[in-house]
Amino acid sequence: MITFLEGTLVEKSPTRAVLDVGGVGYEVSIPLSSFDHLPDEGKLCRILTVDYIREDQHALFGFISATERQLFNLLMTVTGIGPKLAISVLSSMSPPDVQLAILDRDVKRLSSISGIGRKTAERIIVDLRDKISASEAAVAAAGKTQSPADKRARDAVLALISLGYKQADAQKKVSEVVAREPGITSVEEVVRKTLSPA
């Protein structure tokens, strides 16, 4: 099973990315939420993957964050949802918004996604509501009513967690950077500053 790929980003589009890993090109289907965080073509890139193998299909689905991949895998457990529809959900809503819609039993919000009818939305809620942990619920709830600056900080914390930081350490580092440099306007810049020596 291929769990991640790290290599040069050769091509990217809102639905796919191609990585050169040791001279082998891997095409990976991605959600829009991951596309927004890909580096420029020609740069080093690490993508978490789900290796999807069926009798008539072998495909790689890729994600920038562990949360995206976890939600993709959860959505795939719901009857009637295949990989393309799971990717469509993550392309239509951010992971925290998907979590909130499930936790709030927001059938209307979920059924507004292309390919998701009312019955499928209800099935997603019934099947997944108890599988979203309290910590994920807290992260999702924190994103519900946030200023752009708060959202940047939250996204930076999630990015650091996906890089292997503990949540408390990630929050501390991000808070220090935001306090030191309040003029920062992008998540990428916040993350870069936290990873650079002070």
Image (cartoon, grey):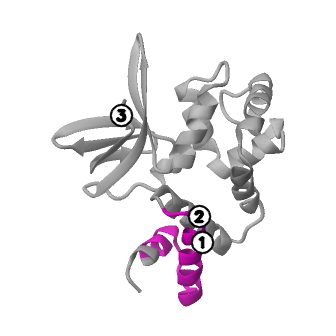
What residue span does the magenta drawing correspond to? 165-192
Whether residue 94 appears in this view of the structure is no
Residue that badge 2 annotates:
167
Q: Is residue 179 magenta?
A: yes
In terms of depth relative to the viewer, which is nearer, 10 or 156? 156
Between marks 2 and 3 in the image, the one whose residue lies nearer the viewer: 2
- Furthest residue in direction left, as rendered: 23
Placement of 6 over or under 56, stated as above or below:
below
Disc 1, disc 2: CB below 8 Å? yes
Residue 106 position, x and y percent, is 82, 40
Residue 157 position, x and y percent, is 57, 66
Q: Residue placed at 71% from the left, 71% from the top?
A: 147
- Side of 83 relative to 192 (left or right): right
- Side of 164 relative to 4 (left or right): right
Q: Is residue 176 magenta?
A: yes
Given the image, on which type of amino acid does mark 3 rest?
Answer: Ile
Image mark for residue 2: 3
Given the image, on which type of amino acid does mark 2 rest?
Answer: Gln
Residue 134 position, x and y percent, is 74, 50
Given the image, on which type of amino acid does mark 1 rest?
Answer: Gln
Placement of 135 over or under 184, stated as above or below:
above
Q: Residue placed at 73% from the left, 67% from the top?
A: 146
Crowd band around label 3 with a 10 angstrom C-alpha radius: few (<14), some (14–19), many (20+): few
Answer with mark 3 or mark 1, whichever residue precedes in sequence: 3
Q: Secondary structure at mark 1?
A: helix
Q: CA distance from mark 2 to mark 3?
A: 26 Å
Residue that badge 1 annotates:
171
Which quadrant does the N terminus fall into? top left
Q: Secondary structure at mark 2?
A: helix
Disc 3, disc 1: CB below 8 Å? no
